[in-house]
Amino acid sequence: MSITRRSMLAAPALLTGVPALAQGAPIKVGALHPLTGVAASAGNAAKAALELAVELINTPQPDLAAMPLMATTGFPAIGGRPLQLVLADQQGSPSVAQNQALRLITQERVVALTGGYQSGLTQTASAIAERHGIPYVNGESVATNLTERGFRWFFRTTPIGPDIAAIYMEFLKAARVNDRPISKIAIVNENTEYGTSIADVIRRTADAHGLSIALQIPYAANSADVSAQVLQLKDAQPDVAIFISYTSDAILYARTMRAQGYRPPILIGDNSGFSDDNFVQTAGDTAQGIINRSAFDPSRPGSNSFKINALYKARTGREMDDTTARTMQGFLVTCDAINRAGSTQPAAIQAALRATDLKAEQLMIGYRGVRFDEKGQNTLASVLLVQLRGREYVSVWPTETATSQLQLPYRGWE
Amino acid sequence: MILAQVVLNGFLVGAVYALFSSGLTLIWGMMNVVNFAHGDFVMIAMYVAFIAFTALHLGPEFFVPLAAMMLFLLGVVVYYGLVRHVMRGPILAQILGTFGLALVLRYATLWIFSANFLSLPENLLGEVQTVAGLRLEPSRVVAGIAALILTIGLHLLLTRTALGSRLLAVAEDRNAAMLVGIRPDPMQALAWGLGAACTGVAGALIALFFYITPTVGESLALIAFVVVCLGGFGSVPGALVAGLTIGIIESLTSFWIGPAFKDVVVFILFLAVLWFRPQGLLGKA
């Protein structure tokens, strides 16, 4: 079936004289990100990171030689053909993501797809790639079910729900509030795929650890006002509040908590919104000591993460955040697989992805490596906890690898 | 105590909704044109406030009037440049005309300022105050008071002044107004200018406590249409009553049932009101 479909796809390319096989013609990789709409700040950060990745791959970078494709030009195993990024705006809408994935595959003829950003959009876009037999590598969506669908063309490099919930619970079991263990946990989550799935997995993991979730408040993203949620928390007085939100709501929560004078002893802001540099710049001063997860710690000079962050900062004037770094890593893994495939044939790239075995030192992020299981999930993804100090996140957990001491309770604006 | 705070917050959010909607109801009521660019007008006003503050170091006492003036001009330009022409076309052209304008404004802003979130410093109007155990954010209180003043001012302008009578005359019957010597174009341009100026005030005040980004209008615009419908098309006091009602209901629903359900409750109520009073709470049949 897939052979027929592929040859049907290839036929028009040959007829119209698209130089798909010409020496030196760029190899197209598609990426779906929210370049407009409410998540546009995250999408544009991803755009800058992916453009940086293209530049690094297409020109020799002796300084980054530890990472695949960096020392050479383009794809050395495919005649040195250059990489071309085809970026599509999914506008934060699941149906647009689907249409754009279709357009990238059938019209742009990309050899692989990456990105997606919001889990709910990765879900719809990757279904199109699956149907067309095109590899889809996601670097940033964490909803567990994405790799539970039995897809054969979907691969994911990021740590996912259970990894994240595990480190939160490990930390919360060790943490003390007023010299007593944590007893009451509250979750506030946006109610699409991302927030719902992370909240569910945290709830299950908490149960397994003998901690229970006392209160869960799902809300619709992009609210005009969040004060009722904050007052609900203020009323319930949990030991820990865990927020799972995108950027706009994250900013609003930090500001509203200050306005309502509410500070839980421990505040966790799960990644996406709280990792966005926009959150740190606009609301960071009122959320001092917020705890977040991250896989990206660019603080060690000489590390790949440090160098990539410096290049990114020179380009954008901003620090690379964790989500953007995970996105870029996913893209780099895709490109490495294409090169190892030695071909632009989807099946060859799929096989190369399955055979991926990248070591920690070959990555720009703090995973232990990249190796996919039969579901397409990276089994070596790892995550650490960071805490906001000033306008920077510093690593605080696990304590063995932490660069800073954990500070509790949450300070907020003081 | 928490409950009192919930109601108070709902009241203050409702006042912002009212403030935000007054410009829309004015244009709607005066001209029977739905301004789909309304949310983006507010967004532009937020950027005016941001630039005035960061580049010109102007405080709110200057940037709020400045935003009102800039938006007044924008409103007049939009009337002469776009609305006057699309009004001659079919109703669909009117709808898509302002919708197109919304996209132009939004994406031009995205292009110039990028999608990054901006904000004014918190507590530009002073620290949060505690009065009788209730927490009051000065910026929200000022926005609430401004909503009241603006509503009363607009209402008086329309009902007690000659200018208001001329505006209403044109709204009622363009041809009849021309027969008694009122030139409709300047009146309608004025209506657009005033409507836009209201959104200017709203945007500049909302910028004091909300984030600023090119798509911020999306988060706020839908509620403005609901407020205007519920209050009654073109009824300025109606927008105030409806804004406050929706604010308080949203706040209580979020607190008691959960924030994910607030839209359901608000919209059921909205449909129920329209069932009995299709013209809205204070609209004329």
Image: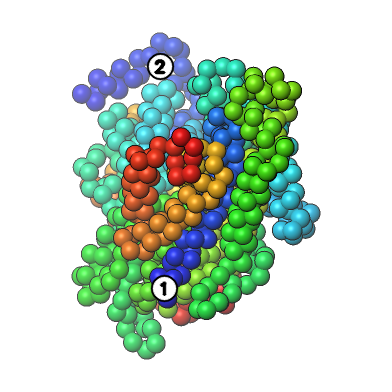
| Residue bearing mark 2 | A13
Task: Identify the subunit bearing mark 1.
Answer: B
Q: Nearer the viewer, residue B275 or A214?
A: B275
Specify whether B16 is left or right of A188.
right
Residue B180, above or below A249: above
Q: Is residue A193 visible?
A: yes
Please state the horizontal and vertical placement of residue A39, each as a whole percent of the image. 48, 47
- What residue is shown at x 53% (from left), y 51% (from top)? B240
Specify whether A259 is left or right of A13.
right
Please state the horizontal and vertical placement of residue A402, each as a whole percent of the image. 46, 74
Q: CA distance from mark 2 to mark 1?
A: 66 Å
* Viewport quadrant of the C terminus of chain A: bottom right
**What secondary structure is found at the residue carrying circle 2?**
helix
Looking at the image, the residue that sits furthest to the bottom is A179
Residue B194, above or below B85: below
Please state the horizontal and vertical placement of residue B22, each as a whole percent of the image. 58, 45
* Viewport quadrant of the N terminus of chain A: top left
Residue B2's disc number: 1
Q: Amino acid at mark 1?
A: Ile
Q: Nearer the viewer, residue A77 or A408?
A: A408
Residue B207, above or below A150: below
| Quarter of the figure with residue B190 | top right
Q: Residues within 10 Å of mark 1 (few under 14, many from 20)?
A: some
**What secondary structure is found at the residue carrying circle 1?**
helix
- What residue is shown at x 58% (from left), y 50% (from top)? B19
